[in-house]
Image (spheres, rainbow, N blue to C red):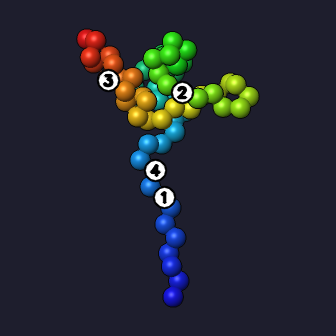
Amino acid sequence: MRESVMAPVVTDPWLTVQQAAAIAQCDPATVRRGIRSGRLRAIRLQGGRHFRMRQSSVDAWLESFAAVG
C-alpha cells in the first residue's frame, strides 16, 4: 500500500517586499523604509539586494501603526 506524501503546511510564509507591500496596501518603498528603520524584521538574501520577511512580521508592523494612531 502506498503512503501519500503531504507537503507541510506553511502557516507563516516568507514574503518578498512586493508581497508585503500588497498585504500592507502601500508602496514597496514604504516596506523598505520599515526594514531599514528596524521597525519591520527582515532578512537580506545572499547578494544583499533582496529582502524576505515573515508574514507575522508584516502583521506585527501593521499592528504597531494601529497602536500608535
Counting other residues with Cα less than 10 Å from the Cα at mark 2, is it few (<14), some (14-19), or many (20 or more)? many
Circle 2 is placed at which residue position? 42
| Image position of 34 with respect to 11: above or below | above
Residue type marked 1: Pro
Residue 40 x, y percent position in the rendering: 47, 22
Q: Earlier in the sequence, mark 2 or mark 4?
A: 4
Position of 3 with respect to 56 (left or right) is right
- Give the CA distance from mark 2 to mark 3: 16 Å
Q: Which numbered marker is on residue 10? A: 4
Position of 68 with respect to 58 (left or right) is left
Residue 60 x, y percent position in the rendering: 37, 27
Counting other residues with Cα less than 10 Å from the Cα at mark 1, is it few (<14), some (14-19), or many (20 or more)? few
Query: Which residue occupies the extreme right position in the image?
Result: 47
Circle 3 is placed at which residue position? 63
As helix, strand or loop, the secondary structure at mark 4 comes to loop
Residue 24 x, y percent position in the rendering: 39, 26
- Give the CA distance from mark 2 to mark 1: 23 Å
Counting other residues with Cα less than 10 Å from the Cα at mark 4, is it few (<14), some (14-19), or many (20 or more)? few
Residue type marked 2: Ala
Q: Earlier in the sequence, mark 2 or mark 3?
A: 2
As helix, strand or loop, the secondary structure at mark 3 comes to helix
As helix, strand or loop, the secondary structure at mark 2 comes to loop
The residue at 54%/27% (across/down) is 42
Is residue 35 among the parts visible in the rendering? yes
Counting other residues with Cα less than 10 Å from the Cα at mark 3, is it few (<14), some (14-19), or many (20 or more)? few
Q: Earlier in the sequence, mark 3 or mark 4?
A: 4
The residue at 55%/14% (across/down) is 36
Circle 1 is placed at which residue position? 8
- Give the CA distance from mark 1 to mark 3: 28 Å
| Image position of 56 with respect to 37: above or below | below
| Image position of 53 with respect to 37: above or below | below
